[in-house]
Image: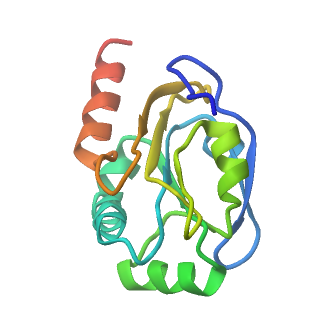
Amino acid sequence: MSLLHNNEAFPHIEVAAVGGGTITLPDDLAGSFGVVLAYRGSWCPYCNAQLASFSRAGDKFADQGIKVVALSVDDEATSAALVAKHKLAFPVGHSVNAEEFAATTGAYTNDDPKYVQSTGFVLAPDSTILTAVYSSGAIGRLVPEDVLGLVAYIKSNA
């Protein structure tokens, strides 16, 4: 497992999307600031709070040109129910292979049951990593206010 670092290119990842199609990273975020949220699963109260907070901040993210995607090991039906519950307007990927995702991104995993621990990335418009947040357990994750502040700071110093 090798962590991803600031200024590195985000690796190529393809994930099945809720509702059909594929989320292709970083391509689907290219040209905009991007946020990639790997969440533990729909059963996780911290993940639910994080996803709901990003959903509530949707207008602010759109105003700043920030795109968000989320993904987990949950199957499509479980992921679709989570999207409906929180009215998530950003793409959500499902059925992620935890081992492959961890090998590609350095994310921590849980062994039994197998899932990806909360992991978040903020990407520049050129798909390089601005910041990576790795959690080895239930807490520690990106929050919308920090992402908005980081992007505002970068834009004001460009």
- List x then y, in percent, for residue 149: 25, 33
Q: Is residue 98 above or below residue 3?
A: below
Q: Quadrant of the C terminus?
A: top left
Q: Position of residue 76 (x, y in %)?
A: 65, 80
Horizontal arrangement in the rendering, residue 31 relative to residue 130 (left or right): right
Q: Nearer the viewer, residue 157 or 25?
A: 25
The image shows residue 60, relative to residue 92, as above or below, that is: above
Give the residue at x 43% y 39%: 134
Q: Is residue 107 above or below residue 70?
A: above
Q: How is the image coloured?
A: rainbow
Q: Farthest front residue?
A: 112
Left or right of 143: which side holds 108? right
Q: Which residue lies furthest to the top in this view?
A: 157
Q: Where is residue 147 in the image (x, y as percent from the top left)?
A: 32, 39
Residue in front for this viewpoint, 59 or 55? 55
Residue 115 x %, y %: 56, 62
Q: Is residue 152 left or right of residue 94?
A: left
Q: Which residue is drawn at 53% across and 21% down?
A: 5
In this view, 94 is above or below 106: below
Q: Quadrant of the N terminus?
A: top right
Count how many numbered circles sit on residues in the image.
0
Comparing 64 with 78, the one in front is 78
Q: Is residue 26 visible?
A: no
Foreground of the two, 18 or 30: 18
Q: Is residue 91 visible?
A: yes
Q: Residue at x 29, y 51 (%)?
A: 60
